């Protein structure tokens, strides 16, 4: 499958978040290829978005969000979990899309081993779970998701029709003031054919 080009990411985070649904996230680990169709995303757009990490401006942590679109923004949270995001928008305008869930389609044996003891439906149904399943960590922060050079990339995948998608407010931002707390910038596909 062809890889998504940098121009795919050079749009408002909500457009990227919606269009990532059905695309294939790939992790190459030596000879092993692990992959899944993206099934849930969240958009974070700019310093004005009070749920976005960039709300505090450019810091060591958020610097990657100000860079070229199409790179991975991988951060550590709650002292135990990695989260994978795609930098979006124009360079200098911080924005990113959190990959919240995938539906595994390649390397299921490895994914199962990385999520030992968990049922299949629990392998990758959350942002920390999919990072554990695909062995994504901070060493991939800044990886070019439009290139195979860094062992992680996003390919074209399946067409997802609008009627298959639900939108809701983003998760885990209860302390964020309105209107940011209730903006429906979480995108979830209900079926992948």
Image (spheres, rainbow, N blue to C red):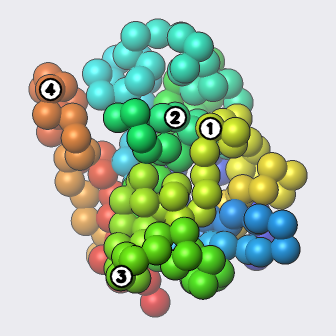
Mark whose residue sits in front, 4 or 3: 3
Residue carrying label 4: 175
Circle 4 crowding by C-alpha within 10 Å: few under 14, some 14–19, many from 20: few
Q: Which residue is found at the position 46% from the left and 89% from the top?
A: 193
Residue carrying label 2: 75
The CA distance from mark 4 to mark 3 is: 32 Å
Mark whose residue sits in front, 4 or 2: 2
Q: Secondary structure at mark 4?
A: loop
Quadrant of the frame with the N terminus:
bottom right
Of the numbered discs 2 and 1, the one sitting upstream in the chain is: 2
Residue 123, compared with residue 47, is above or below; it is below
The CA distance from mark 1 to mark 3 is: 26 Å
Instruction: Indicate which disc residue 128 carries.
Output: none
119 to the left or right of 137: left
C-beta proximity under 8 Å, tags 3 and 2:
no
C-beta proximity under 8 Å, tags 2 and 1:
yes
Q: Which residue is found at the position 38% from the left and 16% from the top?
A: 55
C-beta proximity under 8 Å, tags 4 and 2:
no
The CA distance from mark 4 to mark 2 is: 20 Å
Where's residue 83, x and y in %?
48, 44
Q: Which residue is found at the position 70% from the left and 30% from the top?
A: 68
Residue carrying label 1: 138
The CA distance from mark 2 to mark 1 is: 6 Å
Circle 3 crowding by C-alpha within 10 Å: few under 14, some 14–19, many from 20: few
Residue carrying label 3: 119
Q: Quadrant of residue 56?
A: top left
Q: Secondary structure at mark 1?
A: helix
Of the numbered discs 4 and 3, the one sitting upstream in the chain is: 3
C-beta proximity under 8 Å, tags 4 and 3:
no
Where's residue 139, x and y in %?
70, 39
Q: Which residue is found at the position 36% from the left and 59% from the top?
A: 126
């Amino acid at each position: 499958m062809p890889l998504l080009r940098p121009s795919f990411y050079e749009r408002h985070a909500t457009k990227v978040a919606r269009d990532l649904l059905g695309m294939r996230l790939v992790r190459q680990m030596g000879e092993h290829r692990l992959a899944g169709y993206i099934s849930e995303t969240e958009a974070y757009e700019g310093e004005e978005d009070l749920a976005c990490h960039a709300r505090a401006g450019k810091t060591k942590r958020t610097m990657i969000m100000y860079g070229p679109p199409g790179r991975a923004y991988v951060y550590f949270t709650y002292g135990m979990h990695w989260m994978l995001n795609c930098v979006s928008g124009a360079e200098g305008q911080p924005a990113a899309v959190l990959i919240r869930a995938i539906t595994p389609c390649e390397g299921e044996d490895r994914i199962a081993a990385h999520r030992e003891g968990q049922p299949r439906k629990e392998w990758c149904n959350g942002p920390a779970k999919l990072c554990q399943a695909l062995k994504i960590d901070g060493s991939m922060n800044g990886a070019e998701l439009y290139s195979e050079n860094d062992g992680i990339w996003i390919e074209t995948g399946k067409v997802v029709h609008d009627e298959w998608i639900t939108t809701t407010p983003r998760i885990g931002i209860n302390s964020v003031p309105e209107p940011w707390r209730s903006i429906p910038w979480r995108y979830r596909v209900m079926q992948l054919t």
